[in-house]
Image: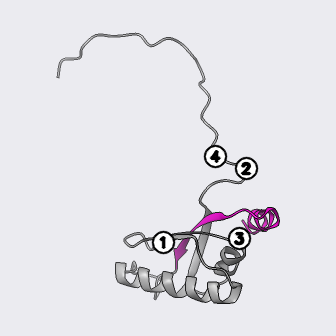
Amino acid sequence: MRRALTQARAKGQQSAVVYHLKTEGGTAALSPADTKRLARRAVNRAAARSGKTPKRMNVFENLGSFVVQADPGLLLHLLDEPEIEKATLNRPPGGGMELIRPVRKRPVKSTGWVEV
């Protein structure tokens, strides 16, 4: 992920990353209030260190995670924050997702109505 963010920074592209927060004590899930507080604290510190501000941020309160769209410099600083457990790119490098190719292509046949 660091390589993809470094490449995006070299190209001047913004990126989006989903960050998952560490649980306090390592066992219980974070409360929605704790998720918001920890996410904002981590983003504020990373923004201060990078000198950049996030373009967009959305906190997934019940999932203990959040997504940030910003300059890759800020996103790289955010990876080093102590609250962050793990992170994943919101979109894979190189664009969208690849569609699943059909294995056996054939016309759809109607089997009629099914009695329920």
Considering every residue shown, the one lying at the far left of the view is 116
* Residue 66 percent location from the top left of the image: 49, 71
* Residue 58 percent location from the top left of the image: 47, 69
Tell me which amino acid carries mark 2.
Gly
Mark closest to the chain's N terminus, 3 or 1 = 1
Inspect the magenta stretch and tell me whether residue 61 lies in it: no
Mark closest to the chain's N terminus, 3 or 2 = 3
Tell me which amino acid carries mark 3.
Pro
Helix, strand or loop status at disc 3: helix
Say if mark 1 contacts mark 2, CB within 8 Å: no
- The residues tagged by marks 4 and 3 sit, at their Cα atoms, a distance apart of 18 Å
Mark closest to the chain's N terminus, 4 or 3 = 3
In the rendered structure, the answer to whether residue 94 lies left or right of residue 91 reads right
Q: Which residue is mark 1?
A: 65
Q: Is residue 37 in view?
A: yes
Q: Which residue is mark 4?
A: 96
